Each structure stands twice: as structure tokens, then as C-alpha cells.
């Protein structure tokens, strides 16, 4: 839903900047865009401070969320699953030790390479000249509305069968196929279908990668370190992705197409390596030879 809301935001911004408020009250369109959207953000932010739910052990204090009995059930399940309801005291050493875990770098790299391809997808207006140069405005947002379907389906299947890696592999293959259609086909219809396929797969993989990393780490400080690393590399991937779209290659942007395909082959390799490791670690845990993530009874999800 984040990407749907982002496209709605872009449409509102476009209307504010170019169609209605440009020149009003001595302000340019882009100034109105920042003013209106900034005020909306401030109002929502203040409301969210009072509305957002607390940590599970304090969830009964949240606004219309869990009662005392439900809070106890949630806490017990979390403790049985990963044993980290109560965080360890904050120290530099407690934070630093988690950077020795190679999984953090693999998860962060996966997000870095995943965000690469967003700069060739329709919201950034690079796919439009490839698909239909004469009607970009009419075609920009539709793939993102479609993406809600594969995101919900893949998430439902992944949770129902406790699968993560197969979902990421499938989405990556769909994205590669979509980019191949977008970059190398001559028919407009085929390119447009490729845009839908790639966009749905990219956004679905973003959700699947989040689940993959969240399911395979324990400890609140390790989660904080992983979240910081993933977020940083997600942003860095966006910066790097801006350089793969070369204006001189318009309208095909072949370099961006190939880099996007290659980046998802790398993601598949990372996930394959982790999944193989998770499989053998779980097998050793079942035989009583290994305690995973320092938590008795914990097993990796792949």
C-alpha cells in the first residue's frame, strides 16, 4: 500500500504544482506542494503520536488495541518464539557485536540491489518513453495499483506455507522476465505488460525480503542494527540506481535494464546461499547440535 499511496501523493503534488495553485498568494506551484503536503504530514504525525501502538508488553496501554489478557498471550508467544520480549541493556559492545554477523550484510545487500530497478519503473517516468511516449500520464500509475494484487497473494501464500526464499525467487524471475519484455520487445502491448510484471514483482519482493530478514534474527538490538543497515542500504541503492539510467540511451535505457536484471540475479544468489545455510543449521538444531541465534528452540525460516 505504500507504493499506491506514493502514487496518489505524486498525483496530488502534480495537481498542486501545475494545475491549480501555481501563482496563488504569490507562491509558485512547487512551494504550494511543500506547504500543503508538509502541513498534512505534521497533522498526521501529531495524531500518530497518540494513536500508534506500543511494544507488545505494553500494548494494553495503546488506543483500542489489546486488553490485558491479549497482551499476556502476545508476550508469551513472542517469548516462546524468539525470547526477546525484554531487551538487553544498551551498550556499545551490545550493538557492535551484531556487525560480526554476515547475515546483516546479506540482507542489506539484497535491499540495495532490489531498489536499483525502481528508477526504470513507471513512477520515475523512465518506463513511459519505452512503453508509450505519447501517453505517459495515462499509464504511469496503473502498474502500481495492479501491484497490490501480487503483493497480497505472495504474502498470503508465504505466510500460509511459511515460505520466504521460494517467494523471493519467483518474484525475482518475474521481474527479470518483465524487464526483458520492457527492454527488448518491440510491441507496445508486450512492453506495457512487462512493466506490470516487473512492478508487481519488485514491490512483492520488497515485502518478501522484509519478512525474510525479520524472521531470521532475534534480539531487539540486533533487530535495530539490521533495520538500520537495511534502511541505509535501501537509500544507497536508490542513489546508485539514479546513475544507471543514461539519457543518451533513451528511450530504451539498455544499461538500466541489464543492471536491474543482474541485480536480481545477485539477490537470488544471496538468498540461495542463506537458505542453504539455514537448512543445515535447522537440521543441526533438530539434532541438538546447535543453538541458533543464541535462542533455545529457534529455527530459521526459509
Image (spheres, grey):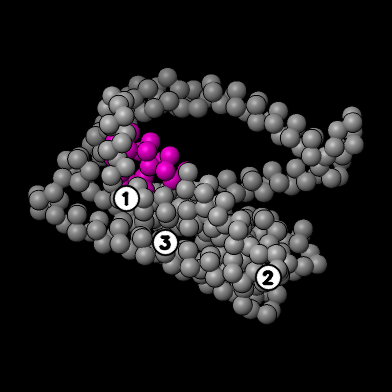
Q: Is residue 288 above or below residue 87?
A: below
Q: Which residues are magenta?
A: 212-231
Q: Secondary structure at mark 3?
A: helix
Residue at image mark 3: 267
Q: Is residue 91 above or below residue 168?
A: above
Residue 211: percent from left, percent from top: 39, 49
Q: Residues within 10 Å of mark 3 (few under 14, many from 20)?
A: many
Which residue is more in the foreground, 141 or 117? 117
Q: Secondary structure at mark 2?
A: helix
Which residue is more in the foreground, 251 or 200? 251
Give yes or no for residue 55 being in the magenta stretch. no
Q: Residues within 10 Å of mark 1 (few under 14, many from 20)?
A: some
Which of disc 1 and disc 2 is earlier in sequence? Answer: 1
Which of disc 3 and disc 1 is earlier in sequence? Answer: 1
Residue at image mark 2: 249
* Res 284 seen here: yes
User: In the displayed structure, does residue 103 sit left or right of residue 6?
Assistant: left
Amino acid at each position: 500500500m505504500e507504493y499506491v499511496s506514493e502514487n496518489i501523493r505524486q498525483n496530488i503534488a502534480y495537481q498542486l504544482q501545475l494545475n491549480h495553485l501555481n501563482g496563488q498568494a504569490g507562491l509558485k506551484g512547487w512551494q504550494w506542494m511543500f506547504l500543503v503536503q508538509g502541513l498534512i504530514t505534521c497533522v498526521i504525525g501529531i495524531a500518530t503520536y497518540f494513536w500508534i501502538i506500543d511494544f507488545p508488553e505494553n500494548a494494553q496501554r495503546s488506543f483500542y488495541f489489546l486488553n490485558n489478557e491479549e497482551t499476556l498471550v502476545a508476550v508469551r508467544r513472542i517469548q516462546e518464539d524468539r525470547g526477546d520480549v525484554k531487551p538487553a541493556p544498551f551498550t556499545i559492545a551490545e550493538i557492535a557485536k551484531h556487525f560480526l554477523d554476515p547475515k546483516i550484510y546479506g540482507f542489506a545487500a539484497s535491499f540495495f540491489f532490489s531498489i536499483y530497478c525502481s528508477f526504470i519503473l513507471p513512477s520515475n517516468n523512465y518506463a513511459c518513453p519505452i512503453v508509450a511516449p505519447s501517453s505517459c500520464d495515462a499509464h504511469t500509475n496503473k502498474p502500481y495499483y495492479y501491484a497490490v494484487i501480487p503483493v497480497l497473494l505472495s504474502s498470503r501464500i508465504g505466510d500460509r506455507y511459511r515460505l520466504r526464499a521460494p517467494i523471493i525467487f519467483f518474484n525475482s524471475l518475474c521481474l527479470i522476465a518483465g524487464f526483458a519484455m520492457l527492454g527488448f520487445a518491440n510491441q507496445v502491448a508486450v512492453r506495457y505488460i512487462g512493466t506490470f510484471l516487473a512492478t508487481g514483482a519488485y514491490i512483492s519482493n520488497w515485502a518478501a525480503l522484509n519478512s525474510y530478514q525479520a524472521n531470521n534474527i532475534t534480539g531487539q538490538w540486533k533487530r535495530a542494527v539490521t533495520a538500520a543497515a537495511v534502511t541505509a542500504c535501501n537509500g544507497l541503492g536508490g542513489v546508485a540506481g539514479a546513475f544507471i539510467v543514461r539519457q543518451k540511451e533513451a528511450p530504451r535505457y539498455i544499461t538500466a535494464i541489464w543492471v536491474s536484471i543482474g541485480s536480481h540475479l545477485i539477490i537470488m544468489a544471496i538468498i540461495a546461499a542463506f537458505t542453504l545455510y539455514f537448512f543445515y543449521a535447522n537440521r543441526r538444531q533438530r539434532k541438538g547440535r546447535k543453538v541458533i541465534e543464541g535462542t533455545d528452540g529457534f529455527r530459521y525460516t526459509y
